[in-house]
Each structure stands twice: as structure tokens, then as C-alpha cells.
Image: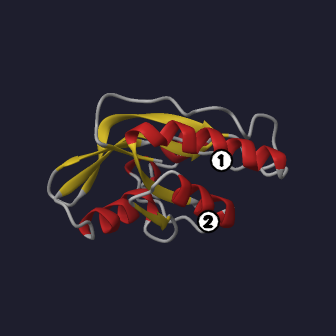
């Protein structure tokens, strides 16, 4: 996955990227925002979460802060900052490459980059993207919907 993603990040002019592992999505987004040359903020509108885990998290009293983006991941994929006009194309091509290779990794636009305080935040009621487990039917679903008019997207 990372080799194909690296090539596509170059092709679609990614501004920055990081893996999402031990600090959860929000922790890694905060780290990435803090390192930017410009004063920006990452605003996360969509949370990709393995199918059924949102309900399980709620049933367990949100023990791991999954819905707050703080759940530590062991292999959470990549967080990529792309120009807004490139983000949907990146997601679409990533999906096509994964399908051709028999992989089930998805790519989603999860938020926007705006002028700000070099921090990331998740909106109050983010859209939960139920990600089918690897190898399941629908694991490459198309979730490359675009958003409003920001300068960059988080994918």
C-alpha cells in the first residue's frame, strides 16, 4: 500500500503525509499540523472506522476514545494532505490500484486544511465511514466525496 501511495502522492502533489499508528488519527493530524510551514489547522469531518467498531466503542463506554480520534492504531494507514483539486483523483486512483492488486485498502477525503493555529480538530458530529474489514465484500467502496471550497484536503 505505501509504495503505491507514495507514487500517487508525488503525482497528485501531496503537501505532507504521515502514517496513523500509535497516536490515533487526531494525534497524528496534530503532529502534522504543528510541522507545517504555514499557519494552518486541520478540520476533520469524516472518521473512517472499521465497520461495527463505532457501536462497540459506544457499548464499552468509549474506553479507547475511538470517536474522538485518539484510539491508538497498529496499522491505521496514511494521512495525506493534498490540493483540493487533486484529492478526489488521488482517492479514485488509489482505489483502482488496490483493486487491481487484490488489496482492500480504501482512501477517503476526511477533512479540510484552513488557516489556523497549527492544530487539528474533529467537528462535533463527524460522519462515521464504516470501513469493511480487509478481504470483505465492499472493502473498496467509493467514499471520495468532495467538500466545500478549502485550499487543501486531508485524505
Q: Which residue is mark 2?
A: 75
Q: Nearer the viewer, residue 69 or 94?
A: 94
Neighbour tally class for label 2: few under 14, some 14-19, many 20 plus, Cα within 10 Å = few
Q: Residue at the location (50% across, 29% down)? A: 145
Residue 37 at x, y = what percent? 22, 67
Q: Residue at the location (64% across, 32% down)? A: 142
Q: Quadrant of residue 110?
A: top left
Q: Residue at the location (54% across, 41% down)? A: 108
Residue 137 at x, y = what percent? 81, 36
As displayed, is residue 97 above or below residue 17?
above
**How many circles with numbers are drawn on the protein?**
2
In the picture, which quadrant includes the N terminus?
A: bottom right
Residue 93 at x, y = what percent? 65, 43
Q: Earlier in the sequence, mark 2 or mark 1?
A: 2
Q: Please tell me the numbered disc located at residue 50.
A: none
Residue 38 at x, y = what percent? 19, 61
Q: Residue at the location (60% across, 68% down)? A: 74
Q: Nearer the viewer, residue 6 or 130?
A: 6
Neighbour tally class for label 1: few under 14, some 14-19, many 20 plus, Cα within 10 Å = many
Could one spot residue 124 in this view of the protein?
yes
Could one spot residue 51 in this view of the protein?
no
Question: Tag 1, which secondary structure?
Answer: helix
Q: Quadrant of residue 99?
A: top right
66 relative position to 99: left or right: left
89 relative position to 147: left or right: right
146 relative position to 94: left or right: left
Residue at the extreme front: 11
109 relative position to 136: left or right: left
Q: Which residue is mark 1?
A: 94
As displayed, is residue 51 above or below residue 41?
above
Amino acid at each position: 500500500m505505501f509504495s503505491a501511495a507514495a507514487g500517487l502522492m508525488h503525482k497528485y502533489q501531496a503537501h505532507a503525509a504521515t502514517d496513523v499508528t500509535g497516536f490515533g488519527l487526531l494525534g497524528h493530524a496534530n503532529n502534522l499540523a504543528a510541522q507545517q510551514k504555514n499557519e494552518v489547522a486541520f478540520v476533520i469531518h469524516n472518521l473512517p472506522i472499521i465497520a461495527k467498531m463505532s457501536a462497540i466503542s459506544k457499548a464499552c463506554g468509549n474506553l479507547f476514545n475511538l470517536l474522538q480520534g485518539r484510539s491508538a492504531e497498529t496499522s491505521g494507514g496514511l494521512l495525506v494532505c493534498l490540493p483540493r483539486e487533486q484529492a478526489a483523483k488521488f482517492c479514485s486512483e488509489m482505489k483502482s490500484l488496490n483493486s487491481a492488486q487484490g488489496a482492500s485498502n480504501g482512501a477517503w477525503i476526511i477533512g479540510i486544511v484552513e488557516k489556523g493555529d497549527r492544530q487539528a480538530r474533529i467537528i462535533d458530529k463527524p460522519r462515521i465511514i464504516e470501513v469493511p474489514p480487509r478481504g470483505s465484500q465492499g472493502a473498496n467502496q467509493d467514499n471520495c466525496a468532495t467538500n466545500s471550497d478549502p485550499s487543501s484536503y486531508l485524505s
